[in-house]
Image (tube, helix red, strand yellow):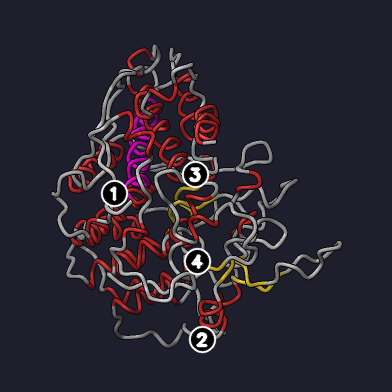
Amino acid sequence: MKKYIVYIAFILVGISCSDEFDQKPSFSLPGNESIKDLTTLNTAINGAYSALVNRWGLAGDVALYADAKGGDVQMIDKSSNHLQPVVIYQTDRNSDISISAYAQFSRMLARVNSILDNVNNVSDKESNKELYNDYLGQLYALRALGHFEMARLFAQIPSAAADVNAENSGIVINDKVYPFDAKFKRSTLKQTYDFIVADLKKSMELLSKKKKEASGKINYWAAEALLSRAYLYMNDNDNALKHAANVIANSPYKLYSINDYLTVWKKTGTSESLFEVLTTDKSSAQRNSLGYYTNPDGYPECAASEDFKTWLTSQTTDIRSQSIREKAINEGKNKGKNKGFYTIKYEGQEGASSPLYVNNFKVIRLSEVYLIAAEAKLKGGNAPDAKEAVWYYNGLRKNRLSDYANTDTTSVTLEEILDERRREFFCENHRMYDMVRFRKEIKTSIFSEPLKYDDYRLLTAIPEREINISPELKQNPNW
């Protein structure tokens, strides 16, 4: 079963397989790129983005990982066993998510490196230098994103780690095309995040500041927003504030209004969406998609927990209290089954023939940037032209609460920021990471006692396959 799962992930990224596949580490399996001009370069880059439109990219399990482990969801149907191993914290070295998420992201990174290794072959780069630079910028940003997602799955968050310089505390840094017989070891956590930051900075030197393709490609502002998130995870609050404040002040993106909030999730390229993973009827995670996990007609393994439902729906003047709704199967012999409260965020993109399959995961939104700025400021961050934390907090809340316009609060606490993130980002892959960053215990219906922020079960184990190939690739503790 393990070999079959990895093989499928391998095919989906568009890389050829060999009879000795199980003897080759995922990081050393780049695609053969035929890049001659800007057109073929763009085609190759589209192939790298397509790796995200996958169950193990950001169109299924991985995009719900932090919610599944964050305590605010429950499984309505416990027999489906798709997202369930994440919800019950069984992400061991032989789990599907360990094997396949590691393979999917590492091969996406290998593909990016293969493209970068061939960009000098572009014959018309001098005739359209701006477009060529933008393509390069997207590649560096994608490489940073791939490392960031792997780091969140397989390593501690720096601001919550005991020692960011500890040996093997980070992930493998994949910054070049490796030979098939390469062996790998983990970097330190500091080296991992320093690499992510460096790639994002490099991308910003090259990327366009224009919106592009309905937020389906990374531009300058998306890269800078992701950079502010990375700095926040590193507890570098000066830089987190600096870059978040710049995106808020100077980008063309705007917060959703109260009137828009319940309607934007079915649309592509909305005002807050700096970067989203585009799905279609022909390109999606299908029965392992976000919509299928968060609706009663699919595998309902990611519904709101009773505690979260009670807490959120009681805040009746907040439009987000309506962002979860009670649903059940509404027709057929199973009518009334799978009853629970589900997010409205993944009910299908407009015009989709299979709505539960076709839902764009919003990798980063402007509302997150507002809350990054507020949190960084409260944690002592300083940056030229930045506002006070309460300014960012009020700015977001005015666009969510119907009774807030004339009652600005005059102060805000970190606890209030954490609560605001809980309201805003349900089922957007933040909750567990936020609880870890804030060093909070996670209460869950799975265990009788809360999980500490550094509990080993909050991480995913390094796949046994990869360790067998590279013996120096150390396993996460206790897995």
Q: Which of marks 4 and 1 is nearer the N terminus?
A: 4
Q: Which amino acid is tagged 4?
A: Phe
Instruction: Locate residue 417: give its quadrant.
Output: bottom left
Please provide percent x and percent y for residue 321: 56, 77
Distance, label 2 to label 1, CA atoms, is 47 Å
The residue lying at 30 percent from left, 21 percent from top is 178
Q: Position of residue 435 (x, y in %)?
A: 34, 68
Q: How far is disc 1 from disc 3 in space, using C-alphas?
A: 17 Å
Question: Closer to the N terminus: mark 4 or mark 2?
Answer: 2
Instruction: Magenta stretch: give its range.
Output: 132-151
Labels 4 & 3 near each other (Cβ < 8 A):
no
Q: Name the residue under label 4.
A: 426
* Label located before the other in sequence (2 or 1): 2
Compare marks 4 and 3 and give the one earlier in the sequence: 3
Amino acid type at image mark 3: Asp
Residue 96: which numbered mark, if any? 3
Gap in Å between the C-alphas at discs 4 and 2?
22 Å
State the separation of the CA atoms marked 4 and 1: 28 Å
Could you tell me which residue is drawn at 42 percent across and 64 percent down?
367
- Which residue carries the number 1 mark? 476
State the image coordinates of residue 395 (x, y, percent, origin top left): 40, 73
- Judging depth in this view, the residue of 48 and 191 nearest the camera is 191
**Mark 2 or 1, closer to the camera:** 1
> Viewed as shown, does residue 237 lie left or right of 252?
left
Disc 2 designates what residue?
403
Q: Residue at x 50, y 31 (%)?
A: 3
Taking the image as shown, residue 76 lies to the left or right of residue 381, namely right
